[in-house]
Image: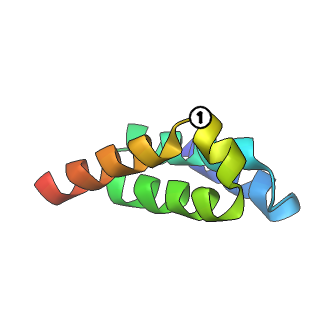
Amino acid sequence: EQAIRAFGEVIKRNPKYPQAWHYLGMAHMMAGDPKRAAQTWRDLIAMDPDYARQNRLEQRAQMAERMSRSQ
C-alpha cells in the first residue's frame, strides 16, 4: 500500500511518466488487486503504446484480468 501511495504521488506530479504507471500496476498486483493492476496497465497502454509494447503490458493486463475473474 505504501508503494501504491508513492507511485500515485509521482503520477500526480508527472502524469505521463510511464514507469510510475507500470510499477503502480505491479504494486496493485502485489497488494492482491489484479483488477486495478489491469486497469492501470490498460491506461498506460492507451497513453504510451510504445512503452507498453516494449514491456509487454498487454500480456500483463490480460493475465491480471484472468486473475481478477477467478477471485
- Front in this rendered view, residue 39 or 56: 56
Image side of residue 61 versus residue 1, left or right? left
**Tag 1: amino acid:** Asn
Q: Secondary structure at mark 1?
A: loop
Q: Residue at x 80, y 62 (%)?
A: 15
Which color scheme does this rendered protein use? rainbow
Residue bearing the label numbered 1: 55
Q: How many marks?
A: 1
Q: Residue at x 60, y 42 (%)?
A: 53
> In this rendering, does residue 24 appear at all?
yes
- Front in this rendered view, residue 31 or 38: 38
- Front in this rendered view, residue 48 or 20: 48
Q: Residue at x 59, y 34 (%)?
A: 55
> In this rendering, does residue 20 appear at all?
no
Circle 1 crowding by C-alpha within 10 Å: few under 14, some 14–19, many from 20: few
Q: Residue 64: x percent and y percent? A: 33, 48
Q: Residue furthest right?
A: 13
